[in-house]
Image: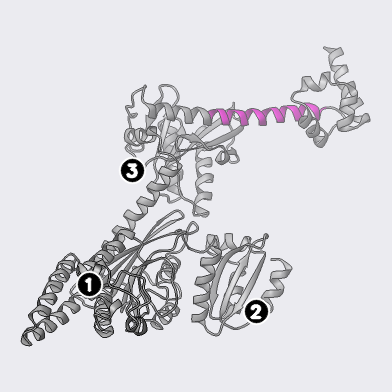
Amino acid sequence: MNEIIQNKLDNLPHLPGVYLFKNEKGKVIYVGKAKSLKNRVKSYFQSKVESPKTAALVSKIEDFELIVTDNEIEALVLENNLIKEYKPRYNVNLKDDKSFPYIRVTNEPFPRIFSTREVVKDGSKYFGPYTNVREMKSSLRMINQIFKIRSCNYDINEETIRKKKFKVCLDYHIKKCDGPCEGLVSQKSYNDMVNQVIKVLRGKTDDLIDELKIQMGLFSERLDFEKAAELRDKIEQLQIYSSKQKVVTNDFNDKDIISAAFEGKDVAATILNIRNGKLVGKKQLNLSCELNEELNQIYYAIIKFYYNDLVEVPQEIVIETEPLDSESLIEWLNKRAVKKCRFVIPQRQSEAMSLLSMCKQNAILQLKEIQLQRMKREGSVPYVLSALQRDLHLKNLPRKIECFDISNLQGTDSVASMVVFEDAKPKKSLYRKFIIKTVDGPNDFASMHEVITRRYLKLTEEKQKMPDLIMVDGGKGQLSTAIKALNELGLKNYEIIGLAKRLEEVYLPEHPEPQSIPKTSSSLKLLQHIRDEAHRFAITFHRLRRNKRTFTTELTQIKGIGPKLAQKLLSAFNSIEEIKTADEERLASIIGQSKAQLVKDFFSEEIKNN
């Protein structure tokens, strides 16, 4: 902890507000809100931090900034706005760069209804956001077919009507508009129709149909059959529209079902809007998060991003787990809700649980689509991986493969290598070397047990994802040893194989006989390539260590040359022969004149004796 942070921690206020953590470059990497800034911010800098994500965040904090607010709700709103502005790395963020479209009902004497991505706070009403543009266009098309909403942009008011400033257009003559521009329909009648549209947009179509039936009956009693027939046609069209909306529950409370699916840094959220028991809309959000993000934090972010000032808050929000700071969220939502809102977390088989399951399946499909689109952007997956998945009967595509090999010479300088292939290509930045520490003598099985344990213990502690396939260079013995090490770590659901050198046989767990893969198969050739690369990497490392030991030992036999000077010579020359033939001037430039003389005298004597 640096001095700047320590000074600020000593002066934190017991007030609600927002804190912004910054890295060494002054960039905001996390935004959070707190009921008490003193308690919340200090909690990050405790000696024991359980979350790997929090530990990674704290290690990068070089400074922080505070913004005090009047209450926690103001802090929540400000936090949401700052996350959208800065898109900090360690917050859950919306992926979509573009704003979602809304349907706008303008605040005018004779309102217009159209789609927009720009929100103007002038009293207009907004419905959405529509994450599916096709769904929005379909809703507008239905509105224009059933209701006579004007399509012009005229500024129509009592004065322009009195002055006869505008003339009716074609829409009036084809009965798509009642001519408000010439005062052919009253402002009250026109706005009654707009209110009917609003009911449809809010998912209250069945309530509107019941109202229109009552009105139709009244017109019939007055013998105004033309008006009654017009309402009859409107009711029929609305009934067709309503019949397309799926009845999903007998509970008529307005509710939103929210579910999220996530893997790695991708989060897909689906929101199902249910009104009067019918599914009236589906919204989808794509978000990004850090690895190992907690589920309650993800739902906290989804709810904040979705329920902005323009989104209708239902009576119930059905989710699979209680979000972070749920009390603050509910208080914030209830400030805008018509009826008091609450979180519902289904505990057993029920209608709500079935709806949540349906929503979850939609989120999973959405996540798979995100992953598929990324694969298309990054290039198609090589066919050889599909072949490998087929030949080895793997559950998942082996996009990441880690392969291990042991190398020693009569039990000395034992080392191991791990090479990594991603999408069938070597990922050399992820290669790892291991010096065997616990095994004496030539024991490849014990060496493999040590290396597998060290590698995947570290992976488990860091809560990193396991590779799609683990591969060991060897047959049944090496494979059994590796499996034993993995099981001792408590790992499950891993995929592992062994590739024996002699006959290029592939061994699978719980299969005593080698797998039959054609010698010409592209999948076997890939496995051979990976195994050979692991062998090459291990041999190279082994030779380097052996040469270094031999080189250093021979040099330290020279009286006056210790390990440090030997290391200097080792760095400057590739072999003892190069040192023997080097002139005294070059040796002096590395280890000094007197020491260079000792080296030259030693090797001159050795040559003379030989």
- Report the disc number at residue 147: 1
In the drawing, does residue 227 fall left or right of residue 356?
left
In the drawing, does residue 98 fall left or right of residue 215?
right
- Which amino acid does the dot numbered 3 rest on? Lys
Q: Nearer the viewer, residue 253 or 111?
A: 111
The secondary structure type at the circle numbered 3 is loop
Q: Which residue is under mark 2? A: 12
- Which amino acid does the dot numbered 2 rest on? Leu
Magenta includes 233?
no
Marks 3,1: beta carbons within 8 A: no
User: Is the residue marked by circle 2 packed among few (<14), some (14-19), or many (20+) residues within 10 Å?
Assistant: some
- Which amino acid does the dot numbered 1 rest on? Phe
The image quarter in which residue 24 lies:
bottom right
Q: Mark 2 or mark 1: which comes first in sequence?
A: 2
- Region in magenta: 535-557
In the drawing, does residue 565 fall left or right of residue 435?
right
The secondary structure type at the circle numbered 1 is loop
Per the model, the C-alpha gap separating discs 3 and 2 is 52 Å
Magenta includes 536?
yes
The image quarter in which residue 348 lies:
bottom left
